[in-house]
């Protein structure tokens, strides 16, 4: 069976959830071979093996932390060449983060292959992996495959359920020679993001978002309270962000972050196409809005016509009561 390279997104050896989802998808089209780079790469092996990686290629070097993107592209290119020389390579899968998409695009250009970004599903096909995408602000669903070279595919978080599938997970050192361009852009400093204790927005299974109807920064406390009761991330519409009510890092939409949680709760959001483009692939959508004609109700699974200042606190209390 052909092998599938999976780029590992990890923090000092702690594997992030989107990588485990990629391993699930990779098993549909071949045998997953994980590529873990940087500090703690070797510590990822046990988790990756538990979720289906037959091999774990590792390489630790300071360049991955000290310089932007290119060292990781060099390493993935080395992995592609190594696996291709030893057998058949079905695809390269990369998490669909901002960095992941840049890595994938550079890799595809280097190895002369096509690229598919923001896939939401993956299946085996007679002529190679077939990727499903949600396009044109999630108005259409397309199925595509790469017609040239080894497919390079980035996959959106929450596109597949994480499934344990114990495999050998044999650790092998990856030989990497960094190119002259690898040290072209140096990282001069880092500022840790202040932790809220909530899940990362693009990876969260549940997202609670507030919009113009929240009517002020101080009122986002009720959105946060509902999110905390559900163990959810907090999102915001562009209108709320532009008004300065919530940080831009939490914006959901075409010019913000794209999310695809199991449950998306929109409170006080009208449902403009800009916002819908960033959340329309959510598995279950609930809207709370006092305007029964709001466009958001056209795509929801459940709609509540009512004042969010009455509905959201009541929902929060009900969640707490049931959990208690």
Image: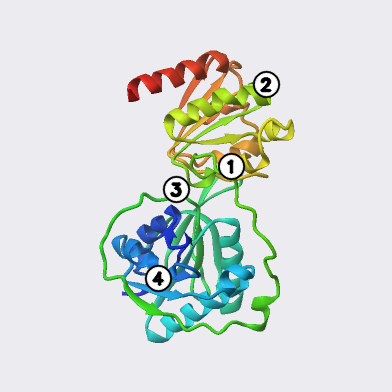
Q: Is residue 108 visible?
A: no
- Left/right of residue 191 with respect to residue 22 in the rendered view: right
Q: Give the residue number, with chain letter if any, for mark 4.
A: 42
- Left/right of residue 149 with respect to residue 253 in the rendered view: left
Q: Give the residue number, with chain letter if any, for mark 2.
A: 215
Q: Is residue 61 visible?
A: yes
**Mark 3 residue crowding within 10 angstroms, few (<14) / some (14–19) / many (20+):** many
Are dots 4 and 2 in contact, CB under 8 Å? no
> Where is residue 178 shown, x and y percent of the image?
59, 82
**Mark 1 → mark 4, Cα distance in angstroms:** 35 Å
**Mark 4 → mark 3, Cα distance in angstroms:** 25 Å
Which circle, 1 or 4, is nearer the viewer? 4
Count of marks placed on residues: 4
Q: Give the residue number, with chain letter if any, for mark 1.
A: 278
Q: Secondary structure at mark 4?
A: helix
The answer to whether 8 is drawn above or below residue 218 in the figure is: below
**Which label is found at residue 158?**
3
Sequence-earlier tag: 2 or 3? 3
> Where is residue 293 shown, x and y percent of the image?
60, 19
**Which of the 4 quarters of the picture holds residue 113?**
bottom right
């Amino acid at each position: 069976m052909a092998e599938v390279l999976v780029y590992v997104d990890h923090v000092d050896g702690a594997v992030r959830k989107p990588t485990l989802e990629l391993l699930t998808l990779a098993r549909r089209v071949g045998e997953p071979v994980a590529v873990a780079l940087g500090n703690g790469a070797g510590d990822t092996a046990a988790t990756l093996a538990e979720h289906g990686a037959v091999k774990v290629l590792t390489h630790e070097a300071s360049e991955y932390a000290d310089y932007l993107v290119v060292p990781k592209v060099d390493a993935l290119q080395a992995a592609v060449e190594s696996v291709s020389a030893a057998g058949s390579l079905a695809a390269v899968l990369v998490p669909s983060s901002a960095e992941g998409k840049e890595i994938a695009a550079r890799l595809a250009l280097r190895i002369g292959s096509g690229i598919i970004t923001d896939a939401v599903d993956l299946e085996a096909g007679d002529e190679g992996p077939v990727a499903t995408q949600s396009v044109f602000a999630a108005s259409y669903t397309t199925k595509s495959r790469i017609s040239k070279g080894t497919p390079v595919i980035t996959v959106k978080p929450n596109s597949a359920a994480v499934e344990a599938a114990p495999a050998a997970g044999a650790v092998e050192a990856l030989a990497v020679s960094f190119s002259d361009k690898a040290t072209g852009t140096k990282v001069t400093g880092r500022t840790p993001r202040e932790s809220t204790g909530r899940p990362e927005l693009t990876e969260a299974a549940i997202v609670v978002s507030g919009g113009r109807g929240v009517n002020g920064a101080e009122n986002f406390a009720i959105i946060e309270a509902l999110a905390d009761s559900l163990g959810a991330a907090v999102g915001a519409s562009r209108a709320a962000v532009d008004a300065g009510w919530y940080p831009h890092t939490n914006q959901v939409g075409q010019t913000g972050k794209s999310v695809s949680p199991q449950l998306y709760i929109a409170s006080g959001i009208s449902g403009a196409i800009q916002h819908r483009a960033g959340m329309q692939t959510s598995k279950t959508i609930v809207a709370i809005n006092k305007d029964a004609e709001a466009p958001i109700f056209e795509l929801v699974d459940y709609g509540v016509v009512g004042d969010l200042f009455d509905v959201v606190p009541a929902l929060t209390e009900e969640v707490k009561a049931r959990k208690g």
